[in-house]
Image (cartoon, grey):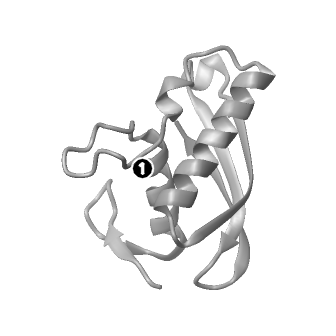
Amino acid sequence: MSFTGLDMRNGRAVDGLDHLRQSVRDILITPVGSRVMRRDYGSDLMDLIDQNLTPLTLAQIYATSVDALRKWEPRLRVTRIQAEALPEEMEEGRLSIMVDGIYLPEGREITLDGVVI
């Protein structure tokens, strides 16, 4: 199951883990209902990121992220998700998400860190 796509920054071909990282970010930042021809694509994460990062909110972020990635990213089996607020001097109101999982095309464990939402 090999996917090749276009890098969203420069339009060049991208594949492998670079394409997976881009896909994961796209799934997480796309609000459900915002794609015209695919209304159920994306996640509900954007509804949560402006809330205080309480343990309950973090649990909701993890659950929402895992559900969306399970549904929309067939190359990845998520084993763990962590999120933390970026320091205000870096990116106020932004989250950094780290996804651990199995990259199914190669059957190996991976970590996608620095997925900024």
Decide: few, some or many residues near mark 1? Use Cα within 10 Å; few <14, some 14-19, many ≥20.
some
Q: Is residue 2 something one can see in this rendering? A: yes
Above-or-below relation of 15 to 80: below
Identify residue type, mark 1.
Answer: Asp
Above-or-below relation of 12 to 39: below
Q: Residue at x 63, y 85 (%)?
A: 106
Q: How many labels does the image show?
A: 1
**In this rendering, position of residue 117 left or right of residue 39:** right
Q: Picture coordinates of residue 73 (x, y %)?
A: 50, 64
Q: Which residue is drawn at 47% across and 85% down?
A: 1
**In this rendering, position of residue 73 left or right of residue 67:** left
Q: Residue at x 49, y 24 (%)?
A: 47
Residue farthest along the right direction in this orientation: 55
Q: Give the residue at mark 1.
A: 26
Q: Picture coordinates of residue 79 (x, y %)?
A: 75, 60
Q: Is residue 114 something one can see in this rendering? A: no
